[in-house]
Image (tube, rainbow, N blue to C red):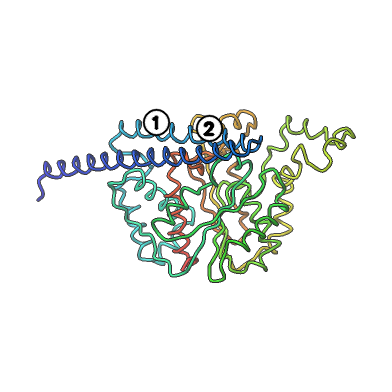
Amino acid sequence: MIDPIFLKKREIEAKFSNYLLKGQRRSFRIKKAANTSKNEILDSLHLFLNKPSPINLANLLKNMFNSGVWVSKSSIELLFSLLRLVENAGFSENDQVTIDILNQINDRDELVLSSYSDAHLFRVLLSERRHRHMNPGYKSISKMPTLNSKIRLVLISGVFNEIFSTAAFERGAEYLKNNYDLSFSTINVTGTKSSRFNAELINKQLQDITEPDEKIWLIGYSKGGVDALHFLRSYFKENTNIIGLSTIATPIMGTNHPNNKIIKLLTSFSRFKLYQFLDQGKDLFIQGLQNSLRSDVRHSWFFRNHDKLPKDIFYSALGFQAKWNESHVWMMLTKLLFQSKHPNDGVVDVQFAQFPSFFNSYNLGITDGHHLVGTRSSEYPQEALLEALVIFLNLKGHLT
C-alpha cells in the first residue's frame, strides 16, 4: 500500500510545478504581446510619417489602442494567475467517466460514437484541452491526430473585425501552425457589406491563397459564417477542394437585433428622398448588412437554399453564452443596447447559433464565453478550442 503522506507530497509537488509553468507561460505571452505591439506601432508610425493621411493616422491609433489592450490584459492575467495554484476550466482530473470517454475517443471506439451526442463529445474534448492550456503541468489524455492530408484553415471574420489587428481566432490558428503544421490564411471581408457581396470576395481571395493539392477548411466567425454559407451556395463548384465549414458564434438563423427600436428608427430615414440623395448607393444605414442578419431573412434563405449547399462536405456549429458580468466591456454595452430574453454571448442568441435539425451537420452545442473570445488579447484559450475541433472532426473521419 502506498503511503498517503507520499501521495500527498507528490500532489503538492505537481501543483507547485504547474504553478511555475503557468507563470512562465504567462510571462512569455506578455513578452510576445509587448514585442509584437512595439513592431506594429513602429511600422504604422513610420507609414504615417512617410505618407500622412487620415487612413494611416486611423491605423496608427488603432494599433496603439489594440496593443495597449493586449499588453495590459496579459499583465492582468499574469497577476490573477499567480494568485491561483490551479486554473478552473470545468474539468476534473478525477472524473472517471470523462476519462473513460477520452480514452475511447483515442481508441476511436464505435460505442462512444453512438452512445453520446456530438455536443457531449465536443464538450468533453474542449474542457480537457482548455484545462491543459490553463494548467500546463497537466498531461492530457486526448491526443492530437497526425494528419496525412495537406489542410489549410481559412479564417473568415465577422462584422467590424476591421477594428482589430488580426482576424478572429488567428492566435489559435497560428498555434496550430507552429505545433501541428496546419497552415492557415485569412480572408478580408467587409464587415458592413451584405453576405452576397462578401461571398464574391471570399471566392476571389481563395483563388489566390490556395494550392491545388490542399484541402480547405473554412472557419467562419460570427457573420463570417453567414458569408461562408452564401459563398458555398454560389461558388462551391469553383472551389471543390473545400472539405468543410465550422461556424463559431455565427447567427446561422439570424438575429433579432435589426428589429431593435433604435435600429428601426434610423433605417426609417432611408425612405426619405434627402437620405437617398445623400446616400447615393453608399448604404449609410448598412441595410445590406441588416438584411444579411435579420432572423426572418435568414430563416427564409436557409429553407430555400439548404438543399443547394454542397452535400459532400462537413458542417459544424458552436455557440457561446455569457452573463453580462462575464462579458467583454463591449459585449456588456451590446447586452445593454440589444437586450434579449434568450441566453446569448453579447451579440448572438444561442437559439440561432446552431444548424436546423433537418440539416446534416454537427451541432456542437453551447459553451461558456463572450462574443469576442477570438481576439488575440482574449484570455480565452482559443488554441484549445481549435484543438478540440481538430480532434472531433478527425474522429468523425473528415480530416484524414
347 above or below 104? above
337 above or below 384? above
Q: Residue at x 68, y 60 (%)?
A: 306
- Residue 332, percent from left and from top: 56, 30
Q: Nearer the viewer, mark 2 or mark 1?
A: 2
Query: What mark, if any, has residue 76 been given in the picture?
Result: 1
Amino acid marked by disc 1: Ile
Query: What mark, if any, has residue 397 been given in the picture?
Result: none
56 above or below 364? above
- Residue 49, percent from left and from top: 58, 36
Q: Quadrant of residue 78?
A: top left
Q: Which is nearer the eye, 176 or 334?
A: 176
Amino acid marked by disc 2: Phe
Residues tagged 2 and 1 counted as in contact (Cβ below 8 A) = no
**Mark 2 packing: few (<14 Cα in 10 Å), some, or many (20+)?**
some
Q: Residue at x 65, y 38 (%)?
A: 55
Specify the farthest residue to the right: 273
**Mark 1 packing: few (<14 Cα in 10 Å), some, or many (20+)?**
some
| Distance from the alpha carbon under mark 2 to that under mark 1 | 17 Å
Residue 400 appears left or right of 335: left
Q: Which is nearer the eye, 308 or 387?
A: 387
Q: Which is nearer the eye, 210 or 360?
A: 210
- Residue 180, percent from left and from top: 40, 59
Q: Residue at x 45, y 58 (%)?
A: 390
Residue 97 appears left or right of 301: left
Element assignment for label 2: helix
122 above or below 287? below
Q: Residue at x 78, y 41 (%)?
A: 283
Residue highlighted by disc 2: 65
Mark 2 or mark 1: whose residue is earlier in sequence? 2
